[in-house]
Image (cartoon, rainbow, N blue to C red):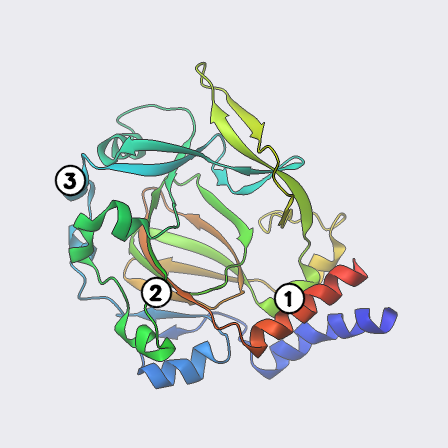
Amino acid sequence: MDAVKECLRDFPKEARELYLNDTVPYLDGPLSSLQFYRDWIGPNKPCIIRNAFSDWPALSKWNPTYLREKVGSKVISVAVTPNGYADAINGNRFVMPEERQMTFTSLLDIVEGKVKSSGVFYVQKQCSNLTEELPELTGDVKTHIPWMSEALGKKPDAVNFWLGEESAVTSMHKDHYENLYCVISGQKEFILLPPTDRPFIPYELYQSATYRQKEDGIFEIVDEEDSSKVPWIPLDPLNPDYERYPSYRMAKPLHCTVKAGEMLYLPSLWFHHVRQSHGCIAVNFWYDMEFDIKYNYFQLVESLTNAVGSL
């Protein structure tokens, strides 16, 4: 077992020596499909691409006045939490947000401070909500990224719209998608960890629950009945508890800021934690990853990490 632990400790170090970057590089524009696949998708490395969607009308149009006129009366799904943390650990629970149906205008009133409301509001429904709930806005963007679609030989599984308050935080997690994240206005702060750092990232099992706001404005946590426990990361990378999770000291997170007009390529299986400026608007494209030998190897590392416990 000690030999396996030593291998798991050396594995991320070798990845950094062989191919990973110390920072997230910038590209001045999109590459050809083949070049992007060779340089970034194949090696599973993130980058920030400038001038990748400079022709989108959304960059100049998407302000509160325009959005009120265009989709103000539309009813959308909004995640509401007491603290800004949706899909995150609270005590011994994995707590999901209250999903509230409200008009886009009502949301903008809260974000702009015209209406006071307890709770933190965030449009974050990840089921292609741009095309499903706000199709009126699709003319201002593209519904896929042509060079990415060509590189992967497929269209995106989902195109998501994001808008929320500064207090809204996305807790550390990973996705099985090749993710192109486009910031339209404001900025996003990402903390990224490569899949090879999995041995240093703790997971625990939690009872799933949902926030529910009572009539007096107080949020309660309601358990999901007959649900299986959810594996989730309890660690907060903004304030890591090294006494409880000493292995995380060996992790090497990357910090990057994605500004308006910039696109982050976030490779599949990369762990990420996200914050934003107030009222930040973004659109992202989820392309399903290839479940090939790369995924197979990651599953092996994950199984070995779970088997040996703390390093």
**Residue 246 location, x and y as percent?**
75, 55
| Residue identifier under label 3 | 65
| Residue identifier under label 1 | 197
At 56% from the left edge and 37% from the top edge, which residue is drawn?
A: 95
Q: What is the CA distance from the residue labelled 3 to the residue labelled 2? A: 29 Å
Q: What is the CA distance from the residue labelled 3 to the residue labelled 1? A: 44 Å
Q: Earlier in the sequence, mark 2 or mark 1?
A: 2
**Residue 266 location, x and y as percent?**
45, 65
At 15% from the left edge and 51% from the top edge, which residue is drawn?
A: 61
Left or right: where does residue 197 sit relative to residue 82? Answer: right
- Residue 210 visible, this orientation: yes
Residue count near mark 3 (Cα–Cα under 10 Å), binned few <14, some 14–19, many ≥20: few
- Residue 251 visible, this orientation: no
At 29% from the left edge and 31% from the top edge, which residue is drawn?
A: 102
Quarter where residue 139 is shown: bottom left
- Can you say which quadrant of the picture contains the C terminus? bottom right
